[in-house]
Image (spheres, rainbow, N blue to C red):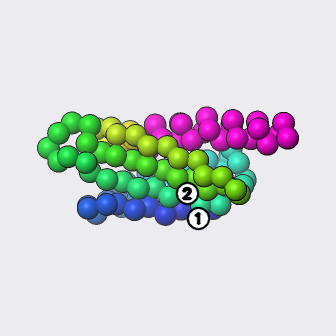
Amino acid sequence: MDIKIQAIHFEASEKLQDFILKKVNKLEKFSEEIRKVEVSLKVVKPETAMNKETQVILTLPGKDLIAQEVCDTFEEGVDKTLESLTRQLSKYKEKQKNR
């Protein structure tokens, strides 16, 4: 699984990158078919609450799953997007089984 972390208009700390890698690697438990995960981090409007935008694109054979959240912290955003992707993955696997 290829993991790409992109911080837009700021430099992501080593601690934040490690956190993201640790969380994203847990997705492998749900599907062996994951080819690539792209995490985009962006600060929307500085000096306001809820200004950290997190987007995660998960690439499977023939399908991309996308989740996006705006939260107070990037850690919270990563947690919420990965929860959403976990639900999407289980629905995707269920559809694959029924074919």
Residue 45 as seen in the image, left or right of residue 28: left
- Residue at the image point whose x is 40% and y is 62% from the top: 6
Q: What's under tag 1, amino acid-wise?
A: Asp
Q: In this view, does 98 lie above or below 61?
A: above
Residue at the far left: name it.
Answer: 47
Label 2 neighbourhood size at 10 Å, few (<14), some (14-19), many (20+)?
many
Give the magenta part as a residue range: 78-99
- Residue 77, image x, y percentages: 39, 41
- Residue at the image point whose x is 65% and y is 41% from the top: 89
Number of disc labels:
2
- Residue 80, image x, y percentages: 46, 37
Q: What element carries label 2?
A: strand
User: Looking at the rendering, in which quadrant would you find the N terminus?
Assistant: bottom right
Q: What's under tag 2, amino acid-wise?
A: Val
The residue carrying mark 1 is 2
Label 1 neighbourhood size at 10 Å, few (<14), some (14-19), many (20+)?
few
- Residue at the image point whose x is 34% and y is 40% from the top: 70
Answer with mark 1 or mark 2, whichever residue precedes in sequence.
1
- Residue 81, image x, y percentages: 48, 41
Residue 3 as seen in the image, left or right of residue 77: right
Residue 48 on the magenta segment: no
Q: Are marks 1 and 2 in contact (CB under 8 Å)?
A: yes
Indicate which disc residue 37 carries: 2
- Residue at the image point whose x is 44% and y is 43% from the top: 68
